[in-house]
Amino acid sequence: MAVSQGYLDYILDQLHVIGPVHAKRMFGGVGLYREGVFFGLIAGDVLYFKVDDSNKPDYAAAGMGPFRPYGKGSYAMSYFAVPEVVLEDEDLLKAWAHKALEASLRKSSTTRKKKS
């Protein structure tokens, strides 16, 4: 699931709408961070955003599926593919990216509460 430099550059350029985004290569893919919050990933030149119950319906309505790290038969992670139409529309991308950030923040808040 390699990520081409060209696609990574394109995604980082598009994500300027939410401010600085840091990319970190990991396990053949790329993790995306905004102010230290892991909210997205790129695998196989596909962008995925974090989902939870609040934004998952947006992806389902667009016919987008979850990231499966080991292919179609493997388990699904809580990151869904971002539709091309969203990538090409700054307003939509900003809204979807912010929802992904919020989902990540909710998840880390829930995880911290469970550890307490």
Image (cartoon, grey):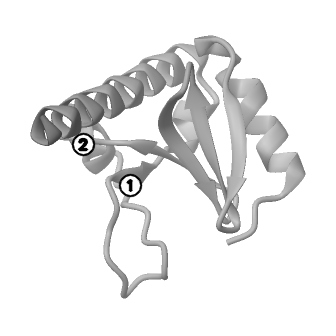
Identify the residue at image location x=76%, y=60%: 3
Q: Is residue 17 above or below residue 105?
A: above
Q: How many marks?
A: 2
- Indicate left or right for 107 with 97 as reference: left
Type of the residue with mark 1: Met
Badge 1 is on which residue? 64
Farthest-out residue, bottom: 73
Q: Is residue 40 above or below residue 46?
A: above
What crowding class fits label 1: few (fewer than 14 Cα within 10 Å), some (14-19), or many (20 or more)? some
- Of the 4 image quadrants, the one containing the N terminus is bottom right
- Indicate left or right for 24 with 48 as reference: right
Badge 2 is on which residue? 56
Q: Nearer the viewer, residue 5 or 116?
A: 116
Identify the residue at image location x=64%, y=11%: 19
Tell me residue 62's x, y (percent).
35, 46
Query: Dot 1: what SS?
Result: loop
Type of the residue with mark 2: Lys
- Indicate left or right for 97 with 111 as reference: right
What crowding class fits label 2: few (fewer than 14 Cα within 10 Å), some (14-19), or many (20 or more)? many
